[in-house]
Image: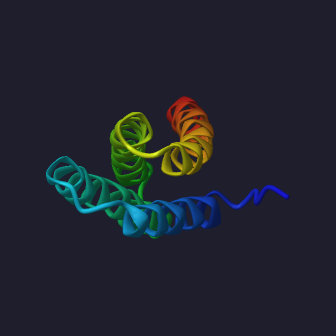
């Protein structure tokens, strides 16, 4: 069952990414990816919380724009994880990536509607 609270979905996405990262073998390439994806996904979650607490439309658009940017970066790292690790890891990364792509679409829609107001 899908959660329709965007903040909760972003939080759950962040947790799923962290759980996946903890399963990755500590190869030289994965160590680089792990550092990068953890930075982008946790930034995504933190900026979502900041956006939720903003007082102005301009600040909301700025913070939620960062959420979208970090989400897209996280999706890139998920693709790399899927393409460079075991079939089991690949399957899980692809499932998480599907949610990441949905989140980008939802966040983009929220930003577009907010800009039009």
Q: Left or right? Give the position of 31 relative to 115.
A: left
State which quadrant residue 98 falls in.
top right
Q: Residue at point 18% right, 47% down?
A: 29
Q: Nearer the viewer, residue 54 or 110?
A: 110
**48 up-or-down from 106: above or below:** below
- Picture layout, residue 82 above or below residue 14: above
Which quadrant is home to the N terminus? bottom right
Percent position (x, y) of residue 7? 58, 63
Q: Position of residue 41 (x, y in %)?
A: 37, 57
In the figure, is residue 32 to the left or right of 21?
Answer: left
Residue 39 image-quadrant placement: bottom left
Which image quadrant for residue 55? Answer: bottom left
x 50%, y 65%: residue: 52
Tell me residue 81's x, y (percent): 38, 43
Residue drawn at point x = 53 percent, y = 63 percent = 16
Q: Please give left or right for residue 76 compared with residue 12 in the image.
A: left
């Amino acid at each position: 069952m899908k959660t329709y609270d965007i903040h909760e979905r972003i939080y759950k996405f962040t947790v799923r990414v962290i759980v996946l990262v903890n399963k990755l073998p500590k190869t030289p390439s994965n160590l680089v990816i792990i550092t990068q994806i953890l930075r982008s996904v946790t930034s995504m979650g933190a900026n979502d919380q900041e956006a939720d607490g903003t007082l102005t439309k301009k600040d909301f658009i700025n913070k939620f724009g960062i959420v979208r940017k970090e989400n897209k970066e996280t999706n890139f790292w998920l693709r790399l994880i899927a393409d460079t690790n075991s079939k089991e890891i690949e399957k899980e990364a692809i499932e998480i990536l599907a949610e990441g792509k949905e989140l980008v679409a939802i966040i983009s829609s929220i930003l577009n509607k907010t800009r039009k107001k």
